[in-house]
Image (spheres, helix red, strand yellow):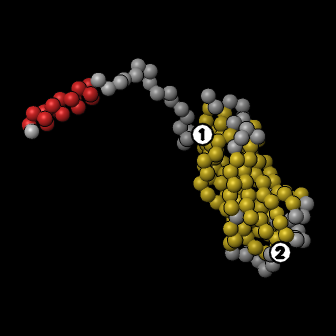
Amino acid sequence: MRQILSILLLTSAALCASAQTYSQPVRDVNDPTRNPFTASCQMTWQGVPGTGGCQLATVPAGKRLAVRDASFVCSVHSAANISYGYLASYSGGFVILAMEDATPAFAGTRAKVAARTVFMSTEAGTLLAQAILTGNVAASPNCSVSIQGYLVDAN
């Protein structure tokens, strides 16, 4: 039994000694805390029912925006509904946030909110926030959108 244990210990020591090493260090990437990024916008609406949207950010050339938190807050007429909001970019980033009912802002209205951690990245270009309004409403809803994340080099 001692011989088996000795062989196992010697074998594991030999394996550790022959572990692969690299002469090139791991590529240093931007630390998320070095380039924090926040943005917010107020949606404008077209049509009743209709689509609301706003431009959240323009990602500069050579950079990538990593969105990590997103939130939508809307006040809508009680006869209307916004079931989801979404973030979208032309470079392929897309995420949907389901809207939930919250405490009404005042009589005749409903508050709709969505907030969650997201893992979305978008290349240089425009990041949009949009939502779809359904139902019969007398006035456009009041919705704001905000994001938090960081910018990193695109390479």
Mark 1–mark 2 contact, CB under 8 Å? Answer: no
Q: Which residue is mark 1?
A: 35
Residue under the image location 76 percent in, 73 percent down: 110
Residue under the image location 71 percent in, 60 percent down: 72
Most extreme residue toward the top is 23
Identify the mark at residue 79; answer none if there is no mark.
2
Label 2 sits on a secondary structure element that is loop
Label 1 sits on a secondary structure element that is loop
Asked whether residue 138 appears in the rendered view, the answer is yes
Residue under the image location 77 percent in, 61 percent down: 143
Look at label 2 and name its amino acid: Ala
Quadrant containing the C terminus is top right
Q: Is residue 141 above or below residue 42?
A: below
Quadrant containing the N terminus is top left
In the shown orientation, is residue 150 left or right of residue 47? Answer: left
Q: Quadrant of residue 64?
A: top right
Task: Out of 4 and 107, give the one closest to the viewer.
Answer: 4
Asked whether residue 39 appears in the rendered view, the answer is no
